[in-house]
Image (tube, grey):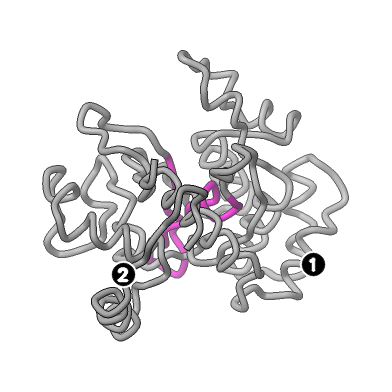
Amino acid sequence: MKVYYLIILLIFITLRLHAQKDLTVNIELYEHALNAPSLDIYEITEYFRTASNVDSELIEMSYYWICDNIEYDVELSRKSHLTDEDVSVESTIKSGKAICSGYSKLLCEFAFYLDIECAEINGIGQNYLDPKMDSIEMNHAWNAVLVDSNWKLIDATWGAGGVSGRSNEYVKNLDMRYFFADPEFLLIDHLPQDSTWQMRDNPISYSEFWNEHWSEMRFRKFNNLLDEDKYQRHLEMMKREPIKIDEDGYR
């Protein structure tokens, strides 16, 4: 039971730490995107062009629009068999909800109307709190877009928010770390089926993804300890003062 309470506590701490909007948000583009006049993607992208004709900024507005208008469909994620209709662009726009493949298809639809090349990436999305999933090869989808002759990684699903461990409800929380994401940062919990999308000279294997190093990196990311100095201070603190959780899940 103590492990259960510790997990719940970690979820609560994480939601609290990431409750504020990331400072890298371009407020001008953000507000423009959220004021889009319709739900028609062609009309939305034409409206985006009134603010900018720069590909990176057009995709950024698309990211803002998707993150603000589409929420994760918790009920659909539990469905045992998904149809093409379940994750179609039309269904996502109409319902305002989607799972990861719906998000990735929608971003590519925006990119299509913006004349930007877009790829859907399938692979493993491994949250720190999820159990090891040896038997699952693909459970997540995200994107890459070609901007200024370089491929950039985007995960609008994780960037839009997440499911609260306490209420099991979707919580909107814009996270810019998943827009033009650093490949090394994304690889911590995103393993693409096609290793090309790792964007590294020496791609890691499926088995390496589950080893001690990458598991530790997922722990560090979840607890906001990716900075090495901060992580070392955390280890020293843990040596001096171990966390104790009582029966109610509090220190």
Of all residues shown, which one is farthest toward the front? 247
In the picture of the structure, the residue carrying the numbered disc 1 is: 31
SS for dot 2: loop
Against 226, residue 151 (above or below) is above
Residue type of the residue flagged with mark 2: Pro
Q: Position of residue 164 (x, y in %)?
A: 58, 45
At horizontal 38% and vertical 66% (from top left) the residue drawn is 150
Against 53, residue 203 (above or below) is above
Q: Quadrant of the N terminus?
A: top left
Separation of disc 2 and disc 1 at Cα? 45 Å
| Mark closer to the observer (2, 1) | 2
In the picture of the structure, the residue carrying the numbered disc 2 is: 242
- Magenta highlight range: 141-161
At horizontal 55% and vertical 34% (from top left) the residue drawn is 99
SS for dot 1: helix
At horizontal 66% and vertical 32% (from top left) the residue drawn is 92
Q: Residues within 10 Å of mark 1 (few under 14, many from 20)?
A: few
Residue type of the residue flagged with mark 1: Glu
Please check the rendered image and state whether residue 17 is part of the magenta-colored stretch, yes or no: no
Q: Residues within 10 Å of mark 2 (few under 14, many from 20)?
A: few
Q: Position of residue 47 (x, y in %)?
A: 80, 57
> Tag 1 or tag 2, which sits nearer the N-term?
1
- Tell whether 13 sits left or right of 237: right
